[in-house]
Amino acid sequence: MQSALYLAVLSLLAGQTIAAKAPDWRSRSIYQVFTDRFARTDGSTTHPCDVKNNIYCGGTWKGIENKLDYIKNMGFTAIWISPITAQVDGAYHGYYQTDLYNVNSHFGTAADLKSLSTALHSRGMYLMVDVVPNHMGWAGCHDTVDYSHFSVLNSPSYYHTYCELNDMRNQTEVEQCWLGGNCDITMPDLNTTHPTVISSLQSWIRALVSNYTIDGLRIDSVKNVHPTFFPPFCAAAGVFCMGEVSEGLANYTYPYQQYMDSVLDYPLSYAITRVFQRKSNMADLVVNLAACTQDENAGCRDATLLGTFFENHDNARFASATKDVSLVRNALAFAVLSDGIPIVYQGQEQHFDGGDDPGCREAVWLSGFDTSAPLYRHVAYLNQIRNHVAAREGGYLGYWTRVLNYTEDTIQLRKDVIRTVLTNQGEKARSGTLKTKGMEFAKGAAVVDVLTCGKYTAGNDGEVDVKMEKGYPVVLVPEVTLKGSGMCGQS
Ligand SMILES: *[C@@H]1O[C@H](CO)[C@@H](O)[C@H](O)[C@H]1NC(C)=O
Ligand SMILES: *[C@@H]1O[C@H](CO)[C@@H](O)[C@H](O)[C@H]1NC(C)=O
Ligand SMILES: *[C@@H]1O[C@H](CO)[C@@H](O)[C@H](O)[C@H]1NC(C)=O
Ligand SMILES: *[C@@H]1O[C@H](CO)[C@@H](O)[C@H](O)[C@H]1NC(C)=O
Ligand SMILES: *[C@@H]1O[C@H](CO)[C@@H](O)[C@H](O)[C@H]1NC(C)=O
């Protein structure tokens, strides 16, 4: 034990980390960086970026490195960055790769990426890289692809024959037909059951992880790849794998966790959006919260490894539908303190309100990296309490969220020591007092709402009368658990 720790410390000092696996990721909190739109090397906070133009705006790995404290001071312990491979012209998002063995020069050099990785590790943070095993990119019609142009896998025999993806319910089509398909861009679809494709992609990912000391992978377009491809691919990578299965049906998405450590929790993300953005009934959240943990047939392997989020670079932002800050505060409290690994997409902390892709890809630098923004502070408090309790002895990370009580618009939850009261009444909600139900605090215990530092004393029934204001969320812990957290005056 001691020597393992010693080795870990030594390798950290050498700028290397031991390959991070699922248990190392469970306590992490991820900030999703869309590389072209986070920070520029020149540190500009005015360089224009019109999302509608769909062109490079100039974000770089050096830019990210220079702004790591903005991310770390919000309590994040990992970042996920856009794909790093070389691309067809203009592919600022990184999903149209042409050369697996070269980096996207718009984002910087290989040395810049290594430097970012080292800078993260020296802060105790992890690097997650987005990878795309499903397809390459080609700027032209499908019948004009010159396969010899690709650095490896440069013959048509490694690709599926072109077909248009029409029927999303036909899994064979979903896996074998091509994404894209106009003549601006096509995505030659790798035959990921072909032995040479399998071995080439394994050699590639092994080298990529090693070259840049990557701690985890976000895998793109997972549902478009035959699932048996993934176990040996992730084994070759040797690090944590989280897959994108962009589908809201629990019984479609969760079974992919049989093939890799984690999937992005799309089913829950849609429920969070319905309940907190569109004010649907809390019962919706209750059902979806239980989908992974309580339904043995759902195919979920481990709820504590799912990626919990409700915004990303592909979908309209929460605030595109409502600027009610109370609603988004509740949604964030739910997502960050839920059972999975929280993922916050860059710009959420600045209350960005872009619509569907490409609208949701605003440049963060235009916010001036304002660390006094209300949601920046809010996310920081949420991460701080999660990081604190996750590091304590006890079962926080392994404790599945329990629903204590709910009405149409208000829910009380408990995950180990943290009890939350969430509501979708919005900022116009009447202020008042709510008598909790099922909190089970010790009789007479001092209880703190870590979002306001408001103090309560638990009654003989273990409940408290919490102050509800402006429909804001309440996050309660026994005061004694805050020792050493630096929160609410508890040094
Ligand atoms: C699914 O798609 C494949 C390939 O196009 C086709 O051969 C098959 O008949 C389809 N299955 C159904 C049920 O439509
Ligand atoms: C993928 O490659 C394998 C091995 O060459 C081949 O047997 C299979 O038919 C290919 N799959 C498709 C859908 O073309
Ligand atoms: C890893 O680095 C080696 C040595 O610089 C280089 O030859 C190789 O192409 C790199 N591979 C990847 C996937 O980056
Ligand atoms: C998955 O769930 C949906 C909706 O709950 C249901 O209609 C469908 O039949 C289920 N599919 C399978 C394969 O169980
Ligand atoms: C919530 O608590 C109230 C008051 O005790 C009770 O009447 C109600 O049945 C509870 N609801 C749920 C869903 O547990």
Image: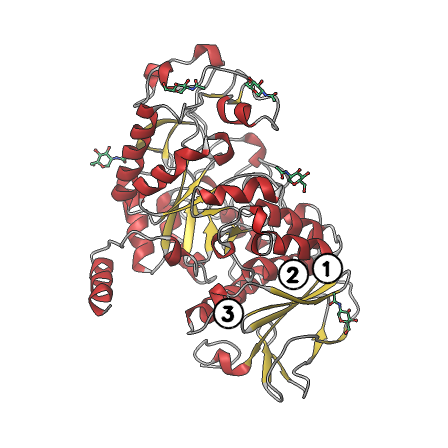
The residue where tag 3 is placed is: 385
Q: In this picture, is 159 found above or below 218?
A: above
Mark 2 and mark 1 in contact? Answer it, CB < 8 Å: yes
Query: Closer to the camera, 180 or 164?
Result: 164
Mark 1 — residue? Answer: 424
Residue 35: give x, y in percent of width and height.
Answer: 43, 42
**Mark 2 vs 1, N-terminal side:** 2
Per the model, the C-alpha gap separating discs 1 and 3 is: 22 Å
Which residue appears at 44% of the width and 57% of the height? Answer: 71
CB of mark 1 within 8 Å of CB of mark 3? no
Amino acid beneath label 2: Asn
**Mark 1 packing: few (<14 Cα in 10 Å), some, or many (20+)?**
many
Identify the residue at image location x=62%, y=23%: 167
Q: Position of residue 150 (x, y in %)?
A: 34, 21
Q: Please tell me which of labels 1 and 3 falls first in the chain.
A: 3
Q: Which mark is residue 330?
A: 2
The residue furthest right is: 430
